[in-house]
């Protein structure tokens, strides 16, 4: 692997996305004065792990000359990530609404 | 050079590179790289088609009209040839000077071996000989080694005086080590000489049945051969089969509808023979015997591969490795009297998976591979041997198809769900599931199809259009070697 490797670039990009996402989530939680409860932490960690897994499969599948596998991995792993995100969002929204009404 | 139409086509191989180039140029723009990349070019296509792109050089390496060493072409003397180098005693004003160095070399090399100096010991010298000379050129008329190994004398006339030395020549005992140490040593040497993986089988009354029928045993110290009488003899003593996996290029198999571009499958045999010579020279250098070691002189490669734990028996009647799938050729067998720690057969759930998968059978264009769900006791034809409960393939159909115009067909190997590049982590998870939760095997096979594995490659892409430096050395995939 040379000094300038395009594969490195993609993994760095994944790192930026995940890091940036974490910062955004933290800021949103702070501004809404919400704290994650234990099961939300678990869901968050699972979704992060799944995103990393999806990204690795996507990038590596192109390295393996398997573009179809790359895109299907986005669908098959991305859907559970979206579902978890929806559950998390609804859970947080419910608590936020409850907090506003109290 | 690509035509205009090709400019608008981003092939899957170029996907990462082209996007990477654009994004990389953006990211490194502050450092001036983008300026360099775009300098003088209208677009990336033009840059990639420039003469500079024909040989990929790092951006800090410039092509110049004159080499950086000063050359006086007017007075350049023509060198006569390699015989004028100092490797030839006649090139020395005083040939005795050469002989003095020569003798010092022998003395120091011997002393280092006798003193067991790390890096210069007997096994190091044996491996050096194997790597340096074990390519077949000194071992016989053919590339393949002769039956009883590289049985050549030390060559004192060659410029390298320690070529093909044995422990006897060095004045030391043959290599001493425990079977475990010897196995470890062979595995290390094997990787350097060209084996992806290795296993060791002791020859006993059972495993001797995996040898060819023409091989017999006699109470002799050393085996011998009378090829004119089709007689091949091994000594009646403790012997082990060194089983070495010779890798096949999956990378090359992406480039033709037969899934074996430029004989990527059978090119492994030529590497196997060179490897066999090296192994033979290595064992000889350690002071031990070596027999066979070419691609067809010993016995059943799949059988020995299974017994050595290099893989499991698969539906197509070929070895399926948990790491390389079926894309290996071959398990090269060398018989030796070097005591070795045997490796046991393995169970990675592969044979069980083959019962439900059947992908090789479905994709086989000749219909040679059995579609029976359960393995069966077969055999009976002259080209088969009874004794295995497996999926006996109709080799006549396979052979007829290949000789009928598809000599490089490797579909059964390439489409096998175990035959994968080793970049994506998901493959290990799938193998973990196959090995521990066979109930999911059917679903895994279906997913293998859905994800497009084993599909015919895009024939619009050809390796001839790639940057040569992007082609893996020897065509071997770095993720699988």
Image (cartoon, rainbow, N blue to C red):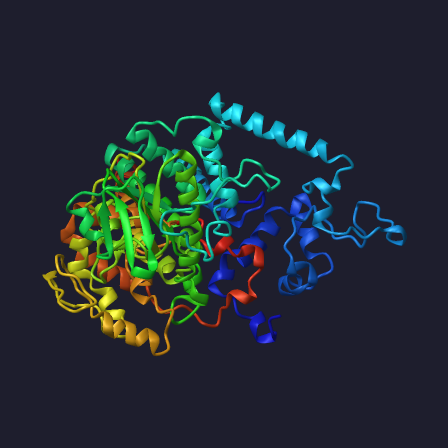
Q: Is residue A44 visible?
A: yes
Q: Nearer the viewer, residue B214 or B191?
A: B214
The residue under the point 51% across, 45% down is B133
Q: Is residue B352 above or below residue B68?
A: below
Percent position of residue B243, x then y = 31, 46
The residue under the point 65% across, 57% down is B55
The residue under the point 85% across, 51% down is B76
Name which quarter of the figure residue B354 lies in: bottom left
Q: Is residue B249 visible?
A: no
Percent position of residue B351, x then y = 18, 54
Q: Nearer the viewer, residue B250 or B224?
A: B224
User: Which residue of the protein is positioned furthest toward the bottom in this rendering?
Assistant: B404
Q: Nearer the viewer, residue B401 or B24?
A: B401
Name which quarter of the figure residue B344 lies in: top left
Percent position of residue B146, x then y = 39, 52
- Is the C terminus of chain A in the top left, top right, bottom left or bottom right quadrant? top left
Percent position of residue A56, x then y = 39, 48
Q: Nearer the viewer, residue A17 or B193?
A: B193
Side of B119 where B24 appears, left or right: right
Side of B373 where B1 appears, left or right: right
Q: Is residue B209 above or below residue B6?
A: above
The residue under the point 37% across, 44% down is A52
Side of B212 where B181 appears, left or right: right
Side of B223 where B166 appears, left or right: right
């Amino acid at each position: 692997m040379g000094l300038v490797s395009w594969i490195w670039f993609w993994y760095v990009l994944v790192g930026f996305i995940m890091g940036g996402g974490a910062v955004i989530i933290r800021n949103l939680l702070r501004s809404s004065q919400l704290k994650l409860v234990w099961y939300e932490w678990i869901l968050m960690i699972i979704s992060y792990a799944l995103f990393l897994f999806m990204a690795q499969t996507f990038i590596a599948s192109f390295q393996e000359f398997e573009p179809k596998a790359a895109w299907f991995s986005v669908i098959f792993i991305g859907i559970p990530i979206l579902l978890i995100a929806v559950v998390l969002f609804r859970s947080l929204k419910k608590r936020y609404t409850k907090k506003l009404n109290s | 050079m690509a035509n205009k139409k090709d400019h608008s086509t981003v092939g899957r191989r170029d996907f990462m590179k082209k996007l990477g180039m654009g994004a990389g140029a953006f990211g490194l723009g502050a450092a001036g790289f983008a300026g360099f990349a775009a300098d003088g070019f209208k677009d990336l296509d033009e840059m990639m088609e420039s003469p500079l792109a024909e040989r990929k050089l790092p951006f800090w390496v410039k092509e110049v009209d004159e080499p950086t060493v000063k050359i006086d072409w007017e007075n350049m003397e023509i060198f006569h040839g390699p015989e004028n180098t100092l490797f030839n005693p006649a090139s020395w004003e005083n040939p005795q000077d050469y002989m003095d160095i020569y003798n010092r070399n022998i003395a120091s090399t011997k002393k280092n071996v006798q003193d067991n100096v790390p890096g210069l010991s007997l096994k190091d010298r044996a491996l050096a000989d194997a790597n340096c000379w074990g390519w077949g050129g000194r071992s016989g008329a053919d590339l393949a080694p002769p039956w009883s190994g590289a049985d050549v004398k030390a060559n004192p006339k060659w410029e390298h005086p320690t070529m093909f030395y044995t422990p006897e020549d060095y004045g030391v005992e043959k290599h001493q080590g425990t079977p475990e140490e010897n196995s470890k040593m062979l595995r290390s040497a094997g990787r350097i000489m060209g084996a992806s993986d290795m296993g060791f089988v002791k020859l006993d009354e059972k495993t001797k049945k995996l040898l060819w029928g023409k091989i017999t045993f006699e109470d002799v110290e050393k085996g011998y051969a009378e090829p004119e009488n089709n007689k091949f003899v091994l000594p009646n003593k403790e012997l082990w089969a060194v089983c070495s996996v010779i890798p096949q290029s999956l990378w090359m198999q992406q480039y033709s509808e037969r899934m074996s571009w430029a004989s990527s499958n059978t090119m492994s045999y030529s590497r196997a023979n060179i490897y066999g010579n090296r192994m033979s020279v290595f064992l000889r250098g350690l002071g031990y015997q070596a027999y066979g070691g070419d691609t067809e002189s010993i016995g059943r490669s799949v059988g020995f591969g299974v017994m050595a734990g290099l893989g499991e028996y698969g539906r197509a009647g070929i070895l399926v490795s948990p790491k390389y799938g079926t894309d290996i050729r071959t398990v090269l067998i060398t018989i030796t009297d070097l005591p070795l720690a045997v490796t046991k057969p393995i169970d990675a759930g592969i044979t069980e998976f083959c019962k439900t998968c059947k992908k090789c059978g479905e994709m086989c264009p000749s219909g040679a591979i059995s579609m029976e769900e359960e393995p069966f006791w077969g055999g009976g034809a002259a080209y088969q041997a009874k004794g295995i409960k497996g999926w006996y393939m109709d080799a006549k159909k396979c052979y007829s198809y290949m000789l009928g115009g598809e000599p490089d067909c490797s579909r059964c190997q390439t489409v096998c769900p175990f035959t994968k590049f080793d970049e994506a982590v998901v493959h290990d998870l799938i193998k973990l599931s196959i090995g521990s939760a066979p109930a999911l095997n059917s679903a895994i096979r279906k997913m293998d199809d859905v994800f497009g594995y084993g599909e015919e490659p895009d024939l619009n892409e050809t390796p001839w259009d790639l940057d040569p430096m992007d082609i893996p050395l020897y065509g071997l995939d770095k993720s699988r070697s």
